[in-house]
Image (cartoon, rainbow, N blue to C red):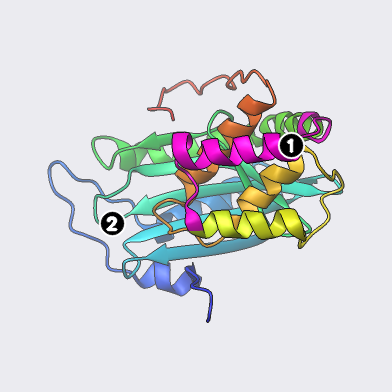
Amino acid sequence: MDVKTYESAKSILINAEIPQQTRTYKPVSHERLIDLTLESIHQSGFELASESYSSARNGNVANGKFAIKNVADSEMQLQIGWQNSYDKSLSLKFAIGTKIFICSNGCVSGDYGAFKKKHQGEIQEFTPQAITEYIQRAGDAFQRMQAERDTMKSIDVTRRVQAELIGRMIVEEQFIESTQLNIIRKELESPTHDYGASGSLWELYQFTTFSMKEVHPTLWMDNHIDAHNFFTGAAGIEITPLRAPARQLELF
């Protein structure tokens, strides 16, 4: 059976019909977000390694992911992502995370350079400034996520602890479902990739994000942020958000 994928060509996002603006609804086009993100990456002195997109509902929901070539180490690189909708189902969201080289897993932090804002008020005017400011600060976020990775690598987890953490992800946190559980279980028995830290909390985190590759685009960002918060919490890592930009946003 073929695996369902939501990966989309950039043209699908660009050609999706933009809804009409009203007094209470201010759409931001996917194309505008793509252009602003790419320009902000360039203006910040970063080099684009790759860009990828996913969508659902005929382009009414879309995600953009932008990997950065010159903010990286031997295992992962900085990745900037956003989520947008035309059907009022989701706020505009923007977050900083990482892309793992060996498997293209994504880690997304809701604490380091993240915002969400409803499609109302000044969103159309503020979005360019917000994206530029957050991208300029992304290097600091990457360093923090490197430190988190190294901490998780140093924490060994037994089979019982693995089972307890997986149970909490399903029952308490609810960011993985039966489909992801089956993938995680297979990875525990026979890993698809070597993450260089067998039996560690980091490895279990990567098994989890590996299982989330094909979650629905409406869930992609929130579920990855929930996963990151869960595993940093399990590692006992205290999160201190980066300093907010001059004009405050509604934060995650």
Question: Looking at the rendered structure, which numbered label has been put on residue 86?
Answer: 2
Q: Main secondary structure of the magenta part?
A: helix
Q: Say how many tags the image has.
A: 2
* Amino acid identity at mark 2: Tyr
How many other residues sit within 10 Å of disc 2, few (<14), some (14-19) or many (≥20)? many
Q: Percent position (x, y) of residue 217? A: 43, 57
Is residue 91 toward the left or the right of residue 9 in the image?
A: left
* Amino acid identity at mark 1: Leu
Q: Is residue 87 visible?
A: yes
Question: Looking at the rendered structure, which numbered label has been put on residue 201?
Answer: 1
Q: Is residue 42 visible?
A: no
Q: In the rendered structure, does residue 64 fall within the stretch colored magenta?
A: no
- Vertically, is 185 above or below 4? above
Helix, strand or loop at mark 1: helix
Q: Residue at x 77, y 36 (%)?
A: 158
Q: Residue at x 18, y 52 (%)?
A: 21
Q: Percent position (x, y) of residue 14? A: 40, 68
Is residue 32 toward the left or the right of residue 238 in the image?
A: left
In this orientation, which residue lies closer to the viewer: 26 or 62? Answer: 62
Q: Residue at x 29, y 38 (%)?
A: 118
Choose top left, top right, bottom left or bottom right for residue 234.
top right
Which residues fall within the magenta stretch?
151-178
Choose top left, top right, bottom left or bottom right for residue 149.
top right
